[in-house]
Amino acid sequence: MALIDKIKAQAKANVKHIVLPEGEEVRNIQAALSIVESGIARLTLLGDKEKAAQVAGNLDISGLDYINPAASDKAAGYAEQLYEIRKAKGMTPEKAAELVADPMYYGIMMVKTGDADGLVSGAIHSTGDMLRPALQIIKAKPGMRTVSSCFLMELQDKSFGQDGVMIFSDCAVIPNPTAEELANIALGAADSARALAAMEPKVAMLSFSTKGSAKHDNVTKVQEATKLAHEMAPDLLLDGELQLDAALVESVGQLKSPGSPVAGKANVLVFPDLQAGNIGYKLVQRLAHAEAYGPVLQGIAKPCNDLSRGCSWEDIVATVAITAVQAQ
Ligand code: ACO
């Protein structure tokens, strides 16, 4: 069974409540109709249902649940809580009331307060406009300092990762992580491997150097991150710094990092920065025709996930399924 079908089946087995703030947008509406029909999640769409019906054309949205934040009786309570959460950062009661009328903030407050289990947005919002309120309000989960992201990669060549499934991280959030942030990314990616792909993570901390073969500040950062990650999670199978071939190819791994529990068999790749991570997943997606699901936020207290503005309605269905599984 394809990875995404396994995730959808897992989502159906323990149904979670997901909010779609972009409820007046046609791909969200198409996705919502499919999700409700297949039972992947319980959904609330945000926006004006009459406007959504016009956008939907001949699609029948009568069975979809809508809340219009601008007319919601929960808005005042959410505004009060938003003000409390952000007052030390200059939030005023007036500003909080204005913000919760915006579906993105209303949706984030639904998740924050437990009125929804997770959120999916970004078909019309930029990554930054979706991530910023999530980071400011929902924040990192206890024990984690850093929210980051991963892509679930499903390769055609099943000899890599676990039956062709790998986790690539961070490909979307932290442009230039410190060693401590990189260690947090590694731990977040390991959690994602367990939660979303039922894999025992084998984490490679990638660099252009293997075990001191090159000397540079960028290599030192990966070495420090590896040491920190070992201290934070002593039982995690993690090794670094490793070049990509040492991480993936058994013969190279044995030569360059003999005795490593990860080299040559990594299923989680941690890139040293966002340029490498973002370019890396797109290379594999385009040149090796891999399926790439994400970015999936990890290390966040409650699941919120971003969409690409070029997404299809099927991409939204997949992201809702992933978010629902993260919420379980
Ligand atoms: N983890 C936890 N908290 C964070 C993180 C993080 N990674 N980043 C920011 N925060 C918190 C800050 O501490 C701050 O909290 P506070 O207001 O309570 O003090 C709040 O979030 C806002 O932080 P800023 O630094 O003001 O946020 P910034 O404007 O830098 O935005 C963002 C953060 C949006 C994640 C930024 O780093 C960014 O734009 N990243 C790149 C996103 C991107 O363009 N990705 C590539 C495209 S996606 C793709 O191709 C698939």
Image (cartoon, helix red, strand yellow):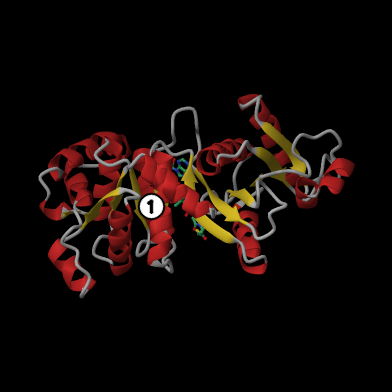
**Viewer-side residue, 271 vs 18:** 18
Q: Where is residue 60 in the image (x, y as percent from the top left)?
A: 19, 67
Q: Which residue, as the protein is rendered here, is positioned at the far right?
A: 255
- Give the position of the C terminus as an image quadrant: top left
Quadrant housing residue 255: top right
Residue at x-position 17% and y-position 52%: 69
Quadrant housing residue 35: bottom left
Q: Is residue 320 visible?
A: yes
Q: What residue type is labelled 1?
A: Val
Q: How crowded is mark 1: few (under 14 residues within 10 Å), some or many (20 or more)?
A: many
The relative height of residue 227 versus residue 32 in the rendered view (above or below) is above
Q: Which residue, as the protein is rendered here, is positioned at the far front?
A: 1
Under circle 1, the secondary element is helix
The relative height of residue 13 versus residue 249 in the rendered view (above or below) is above
The relative height of residue 287 versus residue 84 in the rendered view (above or below) is below
In the image, taking residue 95 as reference, residue 231 lies left or right, namely: right
Residue at x-position 67% and y-position 36%: 225
In the image, taking residue 181 as reference, residue 238 lies left or right, namely: right
Name the residue tied to disc 1: 320
Residue at x-position 39% and y-position 49%: 132
In the image, taking residue 125 as reference, residue 159 lies left or right, namely: right
**Viewer-side residue, 289 vs 102:** 289
In the image, taking residue 300 as reference, residue 166 lies left or right, namely: right
Q: Position of residue 138 (x, y in %)?
A: 36, 39
